[in-house]
Image: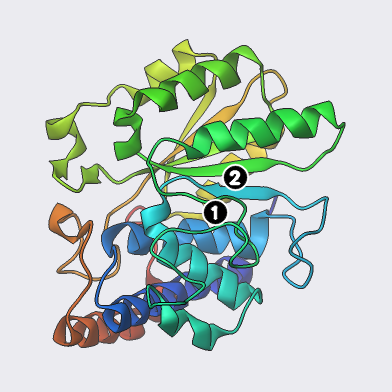
Amino acid sequence: MFLSDRRIKDLYEIANHLRQDVIEMLVEAKSGHSAGPLGTADIFAALYFFILNHKPKNPSWEERDRLILSNGHICPIQYAALARAGYFPLKELKTLRKFGSRLQGHPHRGSLPGIETTSGPLGSGLSQGIGMALATRMDGKKHRVYVVMSDGELNEGNSWEAIMFAGKNRLNNLTAIIDRNNIQIDGFTEDIMPLESLRDKFEAFRWNVIDVDGHNIDEFIGAVQEAKAVFEKPTVIIAHTIPGKGVDFMERAYQWHGKPPTRHEAREALQQLRKLGGKIKSEHD
């Protein structure tokens, strides 16, 4: 599908706003994860503002696409995208992780419109998405199921059980999106528990595999469109991202996986993001 330069620029600008929302949410909460939400902002901008078939004013619309967030700790970016898409007021973002808030540290189904599943234990989201994709097929429905995952959760054995099941059952209405940022809370993934070659592993389990630059919105959207054209197997999009993208002192530093910025760090981060505006793009653009 052709995207005009204006449309792509709009999506990058939305992604930049989402990054600023994340910083403001985390510094207010004084807890939460920074690196993953910043790194996946371009992906969530593309999903909620171009790819997904959804209705923010009717979040229970039966024909909506389902988006499952398996790596629930990056929920600030999903909350920001939901708010900016119109699911709930933007001002509510500042209640992240506060007592009684609908925006807890991991998404909770039923508490907030647009949240499809409750997530927390890593490695569960793909199985949840597979159940939805299988039910969709059995009911003869046409909507699609997307599962956003971390690379670190592929250390979990139940992820691979799900991967085998989806491949065996040829769930072509399922697209998994792996945030391949190469970090987890203890360090770099290839030091903790090497994952490569991810492509070879998924292909061995009968998946269609697409590698993309997770900060190239046009490329990511193209991969999603390609997935829709594959009828004999599920698709996994391995989106290579930079953790902490857009904030120079956070980028590629695994130490930012699970901590929020201080007030001073937040001011510096927001200055950087506001200066960049919609100019954060792939290094290959």
Q: Is residue 117 above or below residue 92?
A: above
The quadrant holding residue 3 is: bottom right
Circle 1: residue type: Asp
Identify the secondary structure beneath mark 1.
Answer: helix
When the figure is inspected, residue 184 is found, relative to residue 77, above or below; the finding is above
Q: Pointer 2: residues within 10 angstroms few (<14), some, or many (20+)? A: some
Question: Residue tagged by mark 2?
Answer: 222
Few, some or many C-alpha atoms within 10 Å of disc 1 (few <14, some 14-19, many ≥20)?
Answer: some
**Element type where label 2 sits in the image:** helix
Total count of labels? 2
**Residue at (32, 77) in percent of width and height:** 23
Report the residue at 66% width, 77% height from top. 86
Name the spot of residue 88 as percent of width and height, x first: 62, 78
Residue in the image at 63% along x and 61% along y: 110
Depicted 142 relative to depicted 256: above or below:
above
Quadrant housing residue 196: top left
Q: Is residue 244 visible?
A: no
Q: Position of residue 113 (x, y in %)?
A: 65, 67
**Of residues 219 and 125, the one drawn nearer to the viewer in this rendering:** 125
Q: Position of residue 268 (x, y in %)?
A: 19, 84
Q: Which mark is residue 218?
A: 1
Q: Nearer the viewer, residue 214 or 76?
A: 76
Q: Residue at x 57, y 29 (%)?
A: 235
Which quadrant of the figure contains the C terminus?
bottom left
The reply, left or right, for residue 192 in relation to residue 195 is left
Query: Where residue 156 appears, x then y in whole percent?
Result: 33, 29
Could you say which is closer to the camera, residue 4 or residue 90?
90
> The disc labelled 2 sits on which kind of residue?
Gly
The residue lying furthest to the right in this view is 140
Please say if the residues under marks 1 and 2 sit with CB atoms less than 8 Å apart.
yes
